[in-house]
Image: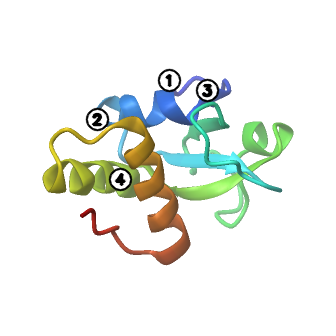
Amino acid sequence: MTNDVLITLAEVLLGADDLPWEYALYIPALTPSWLKDMPVMVLDPEETDDPDDDPDEACKNGLKYALTISCLQDVVENARAQDCSVNLDILIKALKYYYDNDAFIALN
């Protein structure tokens, strides 16, 4: 899942446990849809000369840094801890909440 190809947000969330924690998630730079089929990339953020720049593959695909895979894994783990039967729609909602608020969502 980390070979410089576009994949979907659903693929990333469903396979979060298998992703390298030191990598990062890159999302559409202009208007992320936060839908299951949103195109994303999982890339090594260290693949740039300048730590403030996004990797070339992300830029070529109109993507920007969103968060580390370690954070994404924490979001998934937190949601599952609150509700062991959490579904993909809830995981997306939890991820967007974390992205917007830098905090975990409270599931009721």
Closer to the chain start, of discs 2 and 4, is 2
Which element is circle 1 on? loop
Count of numbered tags: 4
Placement of 36 over or under 102, stated as above or below: above
Label located before the other in sequence (1 or 3): 1
Q: Amino acid at mark 3?
A: Ile
Task: Tell me the crowding category of disc 1: few under 14, some 14 to 19, or many 20 or more residues within 10 angstroms, Cα based.
Answer: some
Cβ atoms at labels 1 and 2 below 8 Å apart:
no
Write the residue at 68% across / 27% down: 6
- Amino acid carrying mark 4 in the image: Ser
Regarding mark 2 in the picture, which secondary structure is present there? helix
Q: Amino acid at mark 1?
A: Met
- Using the image as rendered, state which of residue 54 and residue 12 is in the foreground: 12
Q: In the rendered view, does 73 fall on the left or right side of 88?
A: left
Where in the figure is residue 59, as x and y percent of width and height? 81, 45
Q: Amino acid at mark 2?
A: Asp
Give how far apart the Cα atoms at labels 3 and 2 are: 16 Å
Look at mark 1 in the image and give the residue it sits on: 1
Q: Marks 4 and 3: in contact by CB < 8 Å?
A: no
Label 2 neighbour load within 10 Å: few <14, some 14-19, many 20+: some
Q: Note whether 106 is above or below 79 in the view shown.
A: below
Distance of label 2 from label 4 (alpha carbons): 10 Å
| Residue sitting at x 64%, y 56% | 65
The residue at which mark 2 appears reads as 17
Residue 21 spot, x, y in % from top left: 35, 45
Measure the alpha-carbon separation of dots 3 and 4: 18 Å
Which of the marked residues, 3 or 4, is nearer the chain's N terminus?
3
Front position among marks 1 and 3: 3
Residue under pointer 4: 70
Q: Are marks 1 and 3 in contact (CB under 8 Å)?
A: yes
